[in-house]
């Protein structure tokens, strides 16, 4: 009479053991979600989608890109910061949300330094200064002269208040002595669309979002804002070469995970991304889009984040940038 009860108990015991067994399965054993905290079409989204399929090949699991825009990247960052630290919810981080937002927002729902773990820097971005191709300027000096002659008409767009693109525009105003008006958007994609349509005058943003439209003739590149020319656009001068002394603004894209993600998982993700970035086709596409592949260690990425937070924080203060 006890045999059925024993059999049932054995079945229940086996069922209870399944989750523990599944938890011991080698990582990864299910779909990985890569959260992009900005709208589709922007530079962060472009890079995420470029590496998603190669990562699937390296990790043996599907990597889905999940766009969660809003609040300058804070919404997507918060999702990852509060996710289980198991390697299945990751962040395609951009410099703005990680090293600028803490200096801009009086209160954030998460602390990037405390709640996120560095995995690897994927690429350094060359920012491009670009205008609509119909604007009657051919270089930075002509643009500055145009802006001074039209003080109430020149605008610059960005993915949002406090974004690297907005700070780059504010620094240009400061450096060149002009008064461009800022027009914020919910991501680079919509801003680029309005630049192409001629609704705004200029953008200073990551090259992957702008360069294809320069190549198509819809936009005109005036300069890159890094300290050296972009390998994918060797004929475009740096801002310094174009006459803006001391004007240098760079950014990056990187992978981050929730804090307390086990180190073996961090290392596996790091190694997988590094292998993806070593592929000639991926390197070629990143360089063509104006991004330089990196793929460093978690420690190196974390050190860069700390240094950049100090630099961008000082820029926020010197330009008087606010979220108003």
Image: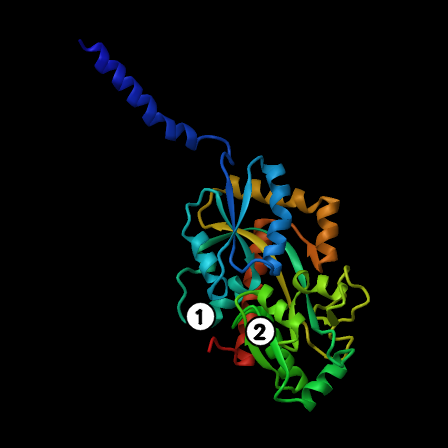
The coloring applied to the image is rainbow
Residue 96 seen in this snapshot = yes
Residue 311's spot in the image, x, y percent?
Answer: 58, 70
Question: From the viewer's perspective, is residue 148 above or below residue 28?
Answer: below
Residue 97's spot in the image, x, y percent?
Answer: 51, 63
Closer-to-camera residue (307/40): 40
Q: Residues within 10 Å of mark 1 (few under 14, many from 20)?
A: some
Residue 222 is tagged as none
**Element assignment for label 2:** helix
Residue 42's spot in the image, x, y percent?
Answer: 60, 61
Q: Mark 1 sits on what residue?
A: 105
Residue at the image position 46 percent from the left and 45 percent from the top: 261
Residue 285's spot in the image, x, y percent?
Answer: 72, 52
Q: Residue furthest right?
A: 235
Quadrant of the rendered structure where residue 270 is?
Answer: top right
For marks 2 and 1, give the one nearer the viewer.
2
Residue at the image position 65 percent from the left and 79 percent from the top: 172
Closer-to-camera residue (228/152): 152
Residue 121 seen in this snapshot = no
**Element assignment for label 1:** loop
Quadrant of the rendered structure where residue 40 is?
Answer: bottom right
| Quarter of the rendering occupied by the N terminus | top left
Quadrant of the rendered structure where residue 213 is?
Answer: bottom right
Q: CA distance from mark 2 to mark 1?
A: 15 Å
Question: From the viewer's perspective, is residue 89 above or below residue 182?
Answer: above
Q: Is residue 68 left or right of residue 138?
A: left
Tag 2–tag 1 contact (CB < 8 Å): no
The earlier-in-sequence mark between 2 and 1 is 1
Q: Mark 2 sits on what residue?
A: 166
Residue at the image position 71 percent from the left and 84 percent from the top: 144
Closer-to-camera residue (262/18): 18
Residue at the image position 50 percent from the left and 34 percent from the top: 29
């Amino acid at each position: 009479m006890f045999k059925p009860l024993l059999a049932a108990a054995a079945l229940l015991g086996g069922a209870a053991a399944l989750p523990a067994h599944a938890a011991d399965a080698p990582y990864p054993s299910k779909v990985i979600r890569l959260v992009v905290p900005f709208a589709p079409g922007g530079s962060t989204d472009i890079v995420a989608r470029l590496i998603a399929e190669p990562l699937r090949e390296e990790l043996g699991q599907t990597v889905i890109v999940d766009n969660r825009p809003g609040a300058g990247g804070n919404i997507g960052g918060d999702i990852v910061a509060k996710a289980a630290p198991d390697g299945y919810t990751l962040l395609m981080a951009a410099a703005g949300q990680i090293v600028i937002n803490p200096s801009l927002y009086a209160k954030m729902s998460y602390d990037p330094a405390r709640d996120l773990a560095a995995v690897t820097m994927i690429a350094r971005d060359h920012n491009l200064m670009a205008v609509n191709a119909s604007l009657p300027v051919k270089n930075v000096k002509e643009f500055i002269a145009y802006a001074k002659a039209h003080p109430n008409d020149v605008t610059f767009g960005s993915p949002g208040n406090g974004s690297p693109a907005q700070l780059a525009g504010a620094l240009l105003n400061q450096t060149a002595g002009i008064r461009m008006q800022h027009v914020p958007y919910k991501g680079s994609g919509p801003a680029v669309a309005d630049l192409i349509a001629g609704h705004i005058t200029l953008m200073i943003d990551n090259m992957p979002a702008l360069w294809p439209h320069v190549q198509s003739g819809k936009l005109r590149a005036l300069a890159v804002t890094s300290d050296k020319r972009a390998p994918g656009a060797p004929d475009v001068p740096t801002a310094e070469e174009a006459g803006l002394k001391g004007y240098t603004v760079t950014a990056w894209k990187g992978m981050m995970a929730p804090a307390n993600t086990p180190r073996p998982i961090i290392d596996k993700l790091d190694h997988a991304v590094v292998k993806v970035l070593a592929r000639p086709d991926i390197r070629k596409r990143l360089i063509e889009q104006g991004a330089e592949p990196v793929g460093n260690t978690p420690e190196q990425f974390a050190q860069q984040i700390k240094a950049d937070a100090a630099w961008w924080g000082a820029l926020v203060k010197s330009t008087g940038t606010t979220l108003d």
